[in-house]
Image: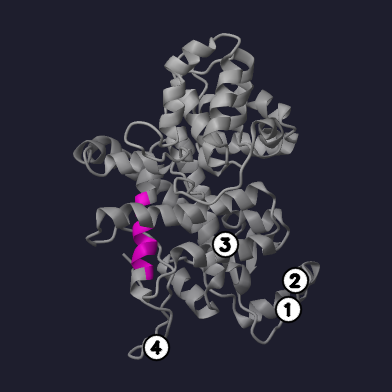
Amino acid sequence: MEVVQSHRKSSSNNVIVSILPLYRSAPPLEVRLEDFEFFAIDRLRVLKGISDGLCRGKKPEEMEKLVLDLWKANMRHPQAVEEVNKDIISHFVLRLVYCRTEELRKWFLSMETTLFRHRFRWESSEAQRALMSEFKLPYKAVSNAEFESLKDKLGQVARSMGQTLAAADAIFYKVPFEEVPDLVAGRRVFIHKGHAYVAINQVVSLVVTQFRSYLSKALILTNRKWTSTIREQEKDRLTPIVEALCTSYLGPDYSQQQEFGEISIKDIDQVAKTSFPLCMRHLLEKVKEDHHLKHGGRMQLGLFLKGVGLKLDDALAFWKAEFAPKVSAERFDKEYAYNIRHNYGREGKRTDYTPYSCQKIISVTPGIGDHHGCPYRHFSEENLRAALVRMGVSSRAVEDVMDKVHNRHYQVIR
């Protein structure tokens, strides 16, 4: 593997070395199980941040800043060697995670390619040329004579993009036009006799095409290894981690005790309309509609209401009032009040329970008649669309949500 330790000139042979790995083979490194998971989660934050930015239609310059900020926040390490190791390990772990279905492969390929494109641009021109040689691209810079004969045409293309053609240091590569479809589609290259003339600052398209092609094939091979040997061999150790990672919750940790304000019973309906997540709005609607919730729903909604500041006395009054059309006061006190007091740490072991995390809500399997769980995972597409429309979500935003749902990224929807 091309594990490279720093971005510098080697003192012995003056060779430019890049910090950007090409991920051609798995690293021969011993990795602790917790690092295996934590490194992958950090990289997943980067990839899902990129996905979110693209879904929101961010401009190229905004994406450039976003990717850099995501990388700095999640993948940097005080030691350069350890940063490279984390980069490589996390890529190969996620390759295992996302090789398993066509949809997962498609998403991972797109996000990793986008990340690679931006990271390639961060490299110096010398390092970029070194990476081109790593890919063994068969393209050479055009000769001075050929450049001079096409200088006017090349200058026209440059000016059409608001750039100038600096003849003194201009370097162009002559490549088959089908190798750079994005440049051709954007009319950003001069084409002559079936060849595109690609400027040095555009070579990212050449490299990214090769990277995408290689990674696409590698994901297919990884899937074959996973299904034939790895999944069974690692069923008690790595397989549970791999299968859970693509639905890992990456948001804030709400499972820890925090200082909250208070809400009263009369506030609940209004706060629900403006601030409750869809899963809690759905449970609230159902308890008001059916005047009952099964145990899973009561736990999910009850602990959430506790977490946002509903006091025990108000919680007892809320559930008693909502159940009243079907449950007598005597039956409520006998069958339901104990569990509510238990959630608030007033019964049993006196444990002060916290709200369920998104990951826990996503991972449950609701039964017939249950209403708890994650709507983004457990609703049918028709019911989810209808729920989003009722919330006043725009058509474009609905499609963004459905795209994340189809790719199983339930935890990044907000």
Q: Nearer the viewer, mark 3 or mark 1?
A: 3
Q: Which amino acid is tagged 4?
A: Asn
Q: Which residue is mark 3?
A: 67
Q: CA distance from mark 3 to mark 4?
A: 31 Å
* 159 with respect to 2 (left or right): right
| In contact (CB < 8 Å): disc 2 and disc 1 | yes
Neighbours of disc 4 within 10 Å: few (<14), some (14-19), many (20+)? few
Q: Which residue is mark 4?
A: 14
Q: Inspect this view and state whether residue 184 appears.
A: yes
First of labels 3, 4 by sequence position: 4
Q: Which residue is mark 2?
A: 158
First of labels 2, 4 by sequence position: 4
First of labels 1, 4 by sequence position: 4
Residue at far bottom of view? 11
Q: Nearer the viewer, residue 295 or 221?
A: 295
Label 3 residue SS? helix
First of labels 3, 2 by sequence position: 3
The image shows residue 75, relative to residue 250, as above or below, that is below
Q: Nearer the viewer, mark 1 or mark 4?
A: 4
Say which quarter of the image contains residue 122: bottom right
| Residue 177 magenta-highlighted | no
